[in-house]
Amino acid sequence: MEQLPTRAEDMFCYGVYTASHVINQSYAPHLARLGLTYPQYITLTLLWERDGQKVTELAKILRMNTNTLTPLLKRLEALGHIKRTQGDKDKRQIIVRLTPAGRALQNQAPAITACMVNNTSLDHAELNELQRLLKKLTNGLDAARAK
C-alpha cells in the first residue's frame, strides 16, 4: 500500500480547502461591487441556469442544509434579486424565482468568470481536467457517504 501523506500541506483535503478559500477571497472584490457574497453568487448562477427551483432542490445542489440556505435566500430577497413563493400544488414547498434585477446581474457574470479564469494560471485543458477531477472526487465522496 502506498504511504499516505502525514503533513497537512501534502494532503489532498488541505489543497482543496485552501484552494476553496483563495477562490472565495479572489471573487470577493468582484462580487462586492455587486453587493453579493460568493455563496449568494453561486446560488444566483444556479437560478440563471434554471429559474423557479424549489428550496430543497437548491439546497441539494449546493450541498447545504435548508436551514443554512434559507437565511442566504432571505438576504437575496431583501436585495431584490429573488422572490420566494409557495408552490402551486404543495404550499409547503418554497419556489425561488429571479426578479428582473436578479436576472440583470447575469450580464456581469462573464466578465467576472473571465477575470477569475485568467488569474488561475491554468490553461483551458488544465481547467477542464481540474473540473473533471473535482467532479470525480465529489461523486466518490458522495457515494462513500451514502453507504
Image: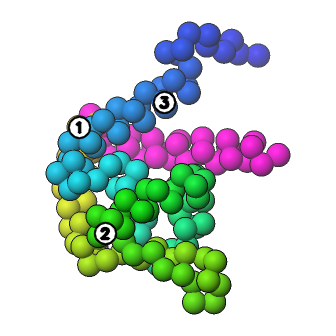
Amino acid type shown at disc 3 = Tyr
Element marked by disc 3:
helix
Count neighbours of disc 3 (C-alpha within 10 A) and say few if under 14, some if 14 to 19, many if 20 or more: few
Q: Position of residue 107 (x, y in %)?
A: 21, 67
Looking at the image, which residue is at 67% across and 41% down? 141
Tag 2 and tag 1, C-beta contact below 8 Å: no
Which residue in the protein does label 1 denote? 119
Q: Which mark is residue 17?
A: 3
Whole-percent x, y for residue 56 in the image: 60, 66
Mark 1–mark 3 distance (CA, rounded to whole Å): 18 Å
Q: Which of marks 2 and 1 is in front?
A: 2
Question: Which quadrant does the N terminus fall into?
Answer: top right
Q: Which of marks 1 and 3 is nearer the N terminus?
A: 3
- Asked which secondary structure carries label 1, the reply is helix
User: Closer to us: mark 1 or mark 3?
Assistant: 3
Measuring from the top left, give residue 70's x and y in whole percent: 51, 60
Q: Is residue 138 found left or right of 132 in the rendered image?
A: right
Report whether 119 appears left or right of 95. Answer: left
In the rendered structure, which amino acid carries the disc numbered 1? Asn
- Prevailing secondary structure of the magenta residues: helix
107 vs 117, nearest the viewer: 107
Q: Which residue is drawn at the image coordinates 64% and 48% (left, top)? A: 139
With respect to residue 54, does 113 lie above or below? above
Please say whether residue 110 is visible from this viewpoint.
no
Secondary structure under tag 2 reads loop
**Residue depicted at 66% across the width and 15% down the height:** 4
Inspect this view and state whether residue 17 appears.
yes
- Residue at 29% x, 64% y is 79
The magenta region covers: 121-147
Residue 111: image x %, image y %?
A: 18, 56
Which residue is identified by label 2? Answer: 81
